[in-house]
Amino acid sequence: MADFPSKVTTETSSPNSQSSQHGGNSLRGLAANVTTMMDMTFIRSIPAILMMAEIFLGLLQWALIASARYTLLPAYGWVMFVAVTLWILTTILFFMILFRTQQKLTAIPWPLTVMVYQGAATVLYLTAFLANAASVHPLFNSYFYGHLAAAAFFGALVTLAYGASAFFSYLDWKGDGGNAATNTVPT
């Protein structure tokens, strides 16, 4: 016990080295930490551009319907439910992929999950678009006719964007033969 203090060494670091190592308390350090967490190659990919289009066009659609008297027709309740629910889920999925959360949750088969989500969203948006387009009547709600007609147009665009995303998700799920088993077998 007498030799204990001689065997212990302590090292301290200066506050500047620790703050520069972790980005510090500055806004620049925080921005550097956030950009290192983001997957910048994902933002430049076609699936990311389609997801951003889905988020933007879906927001336009449900904002146009919400600005009209959509409670008068039951079909618009379904359109609003699909539009808002899928807008929220797509936004969450976009940020999960952007910040590489799926790499931390390895138990989930992400390519299959994203493909099933995009396919289901395509079918749901197709039904919502058809309900929206069938419910647009110039005589029934003449003041909001333009809002509801524009919402039907943006619903068609969002349906096409989800369909394209489902196709690219299928290609990602199907893969290009880039797994370890096919790369190690000589052909």
Image (cartoon, rainbow, N blue to C red):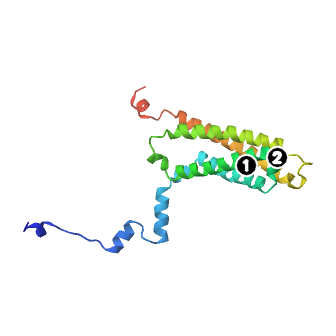
Residue sitting at x 78%, y 43%: 75
Picture coordinates of residue 83, whole percent (x, y): 70, 48
Measuring from the top left, give residue 13's x and y in whole percent. 29, 71
Answer with left or right where residue 79 lies relative to residue 9.
Answer: right
Residue 86: image location, x then y, percent? 65, 47
Frontmost of labels 1 and 2 is 2
- Is 150 placed above or below 23 here? above
Q: Measuring 76% from the left and 55% from the top, which residue is drawn there?
A: 66
User: Residue under circle 1?
Assistant: 80
Q: Which residue is at the far top? A: 187
On screen, residue 89 versus residue 13, left or right, reads right
Element on which disc 1 rests: helix
Q: Residue at x 78, y 50 (%)?
A: 151
- Kindly identify which numbered label has been placed on residue 3: none
| Cα gap from disc 1 to disc 2, whole angstroms | 11 Å
Label 2: few (<14), some or many (≥20) within 10 Å? few
Earlier-in-chain disc, 1 versus 2: 2
User: Between 183 and 56, which is closer to the camera in this rendering?
Assistant: 56
Q: Residue 73, labelled with which disc?
A: 2
Rate crowding at label 1 as few (under 14), some (14 to 19) or many (20 or more) other CA atoms within 10 Å. many
How many numbered circles does the render carry? 2
Horizontal side, residue 2 vs residue 187: left or right: left
